[in-house]
Amino acid sequence: MADDLLVVSRGGQLADLWERPAWRVTAYLVLVAALGAIGGLLWSALTPLSSYTVREELNAAITERGQAQIVAGDVVFALLAALIGLVVGVVGWAILHRRGWLVTFVPVLAAAAAALVMWRVGTMVGQTGFSVRLAAAAPGDTVPIDLQLRSMAALLVAPFAAVTPIMLLAAFWPEPRREQPRPPSVVAH
């Protein structure tokens, strides 16, 4: 009876779980959500915000440079979304390229979700309540604007960036070699 010992390793169980498409997609989506959250924190930290200066007449003015800088939030968001989209696309290809149809839409939807998470986290962490801060400001104070996404089209940058490496890798990635039986050689007499 001692010879009939069955040993199950956890490494084997994890490898079996990883081969299931549902587990791969779940792990991938968790990674993508984390990337989106990190992107939101970076968006909040890296975006230079324009500010209004409260004058003696109790009106607020913004410089011409400040007016041009209002779009900085959208520009920084679009650049970060493009970077995150590329990472999501490459990782999606690496994880799902042997899973057939999953690689065609899961990374694109995941990149869209990452952009939404990035937007929500960035606006939650960034400055808000501009009108309240402006109303409470004294003459001479500078009040930065809220961090907000003014162009909703910037949310589409991540899915477009994610689909690019998938298309390129699908077009140029070498197919696995399959051994084909050789036809019998014909010998001329």
Image: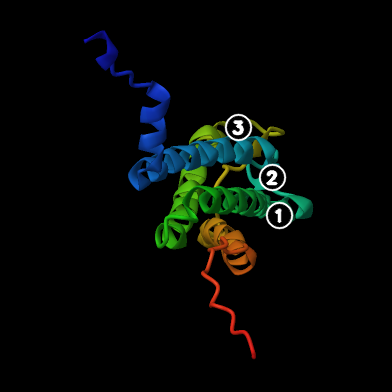
Going by the numbered disc 1, the residue's amino acid type is Gln
Residue occupied by mark 1: 67
Residue 133, horizontal then vertical, whole percent: 55, 34
Tell me which residue sits at (57%, 43%) in the image: 147
Residue 80, horizontal then vertical, whole percent: 63, 48
**Measured Cα–Cα span from mark 1 to mark 2:** 7 Å
Label pair 1/2, CB-CB below 8 angstroms: yes
Q: Nearer the viewer, residue 150 or 50?
A: 150
Tell me which residue sits at (25%, 16%) in the image: 4
Going by the numbered disc 2, the residue's amino acid type is Ser
Q: Residues within 10 Å of mark 2 (few under 14, many from 20)?
A: many
Residue 137 shows in this picture: yes
Residue 130 shows in this picture: no
Q: Residues within 10 Å of mark 1 (few under 14, many from 20)?
A: few
Tell me which residue sits at (71%, 54%) in the image: 67
173 vs 29, left or right, is: right
Residue occupied by mark 3: 137
Residue 154, horizontal then vertical, whole percent: 56, 58
What is the residue that sits farthest to the top in this orientation?
A: 2
Foreground disc of the pair 2, 3? 2
Going by the numbered disc 3, the residue's amino acid type is Ala
Q: Nearer the viewer, residue 149 or 14?
A: 14
Q: Quadrant of the N terminus?
A: top left
Helix, strand or loop at mark 2: loop
The answer to whether residue 93 is above or below residue 34 is: below
**Measured Cα–Cα span from mark 2 to mark 3:** 16 Å
What is the residue that sits farthest to the left in this orientation?
A: 1
For marks 1 and 2, the one nearer the N-term is 2
**Measured Cα–Cα span from mark 3 to mark 1:** 20 Å
Label pair 3/1, CB-CB below 8 angstroms: no
Disc number placed over residue 50 in the picture, else none: 2
